[in-house]
Image (cartoon, rainbow, N blue to C red):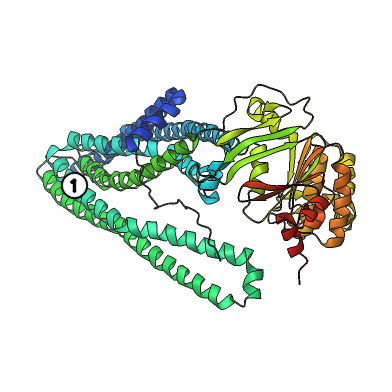
Amino acid sequence: MAKTKTRVHGPGNVDHAKDFKGTIKRLFAYISRYKVLIILTFLFAIGSTIFAIVSPKILGNATTEIYTGLIAKINGTGGINFHNIKKILICLVILYFVSALFSYIQSLIMTGVSGRTCYRLRKEVSKKLNKLPMSYFDKQSVGDILSIITNDIDTLQLTLNSSLTQFVTSIVTVIGIFIMMCSINVFLAIITALVLPVASFIVLIIISKSQKHFKNQQKYLAEVDAEVEEMITGHLVIKAFNAEEKSMAKYNLDNEKLYEAGFKAGFLSGLMQPIMNFVGNLNYAVIAILGAIYAIKGKITIGNIQSFIQYSRQFTNPIAQLAQISNQIQSMVAASERVFNFLDNEDYIDEGTLTTENISGNIEFKNVKFGYQKDKTIIKNFNAKVKKGEKIAIVGPTGAGKTTIVKLLMRFYELNDGEILLDGKNIKEYKRNELESVFAMVLQDTWLFNGTILDNLRYGNLKATDEQVIEAAKTANVDYFIRTLPDGYNMILNEETSNISSGQKQLLTIARAILADPKILILDEATSNVDTRTEELIQKAMDKVMEGRTSFIIAHRLSTIKNADLILVMNEGDIVEVGKHEELLKKKGFYAEIYNSQFEK
């Protein structure tokens, strides 16, 4: 079974941007419209941190006040001044409240900024999807595109929402705590600051060791997800070939790798907090002993010792936060780079100015040359004239270029050379969105979405009434089977559209094309998934629909195109024969060879 590879981004899976500085610069330029709000966010974050940092020292003053009062009471010289303690506690409550309020405000503002930024990005990505040429989707996997729309933008939003403000508060916390410690005792502050390089060194070692395991974890998670998806979507094939044990063995192998990578990543990352606590406890013991000595000598008050110990306990926390934030910022920049690279792809060319309002349907291919890769031409010199209302069949072996011709007609791809004329005008001269509305295409590969049958049919004409939808279904001979389904036209198709058969799906797509009422109809193996009796019914319906309408029919079963006005026989990108069915059979050429081969024993 072919495996679908989807890039997965998640916690711990840090991709590195190729142009870190350039992406950061572009990202900040992108959110510069919110620069006032971002500045306010940082100011509130700094204010919240400062108020939180000042609080321990004020709390220490309350402790000193109580201690001094108790000593005075024991000596008989006074007592505890509860009025001062009350003022200190009220001041402390106000500081805590203001700190919490500032923190809430900055969080609220940043949530709005990140939400608006990513909302704008999603809109631009959505618009970009509709402007990209088909060649882009030929080269890019669906998984990568989905990853950009979902994972990458979500990563950007999450990091913008939390990590940037955390980065600011962590730096302010380290600097602020050091200043507050220096205001109490410079020597003890320097002793505590020695923990900084030790903690940083430990954090860097753990990150360097655990990072590869986090990446492996996400890699194996993607493989396990792909295995599960294949086992669910391909369960009929697995059953048919008795491959259950083989599938489970592959799944168990990937699952085992995922477990090992997850265990190693979790074990190493889990070491960070205990080790940091151990370093912090050592620092705590040193500060407690030195502080006691200083207090005995009268160089420091009891309350200041308490405040200093609180500061020393908090000093190492921002280091771990900065390490974690740095990973998140790298992920954010890498995600932003992927989004920007997607948005930088060239749009399809739309230089047309003509309207298609009065199009009749005369088409001419003049010296058309095309290759999906410019150095590999597959349509070499295609020439054909199609008059309004004609029914043209295009036949030939697989790979002859039949479907490519109609894709070029709909301007899914740009020609290497030559031109295609619609009513005597180059199709490049028509407005692109109007040109697309001229055609309706029924493909061999059906596409229906999760929703009611009625909504799926109305996709061909969003303004159609229920009566018009039902009439189109009757024309396509699909009304009868719809009414036999649970809820009829209101039956909901599931995401896989597996609750109806392949033939029924194809009937629905034909009805959808009929409802679109196009000026030019294209049928690409449109009856390949239906039985012979249903095919005859559809053929009669399509004959009625194609009356007075230019139509192209691509078919391998040549019995379905006997009544075509003109048959173009293609081989290796060129037209090798042209004529009607009986004429081509009499020539006993390439068409006759293909036709007769379908009836040989």
At label 1, which amino acid type do we have? Pro
**Quadrant that contains the C terminus:** bottom right
Q: Position of residue 25 (x, y in %)?
A: 36, 30
Counting the numbered discs, the total is: 1
Q: Local crowd at mark 1 within 10 Å, few (<14), some, or many (≥20)?
A: few
Residue visible at 53% across and 65% down in the picture: 227
> Could one spot residue 86 in this view of the protein?
no
Q: Secondary structure at mark 1?
A: helix
Relative side of 566 to 544, left or right: left
Q: Position of residue 245 (x, y in %)?
A: 56, 78
Q: Quadrant of residue 238?
A: bottom right
Relative side of 207 to 75, left or right: right
**Quadrant that contains the N terminus:** bottom right
Q: Residue beneath label 1, please?
A: 197
Relative side of 506 to 233, left or right: right
Q: Between residue 351 and residue 132, name the one nearer to us.
A: 351
Q: Position of residue 399 (x, y in %)?
A: 62, 53
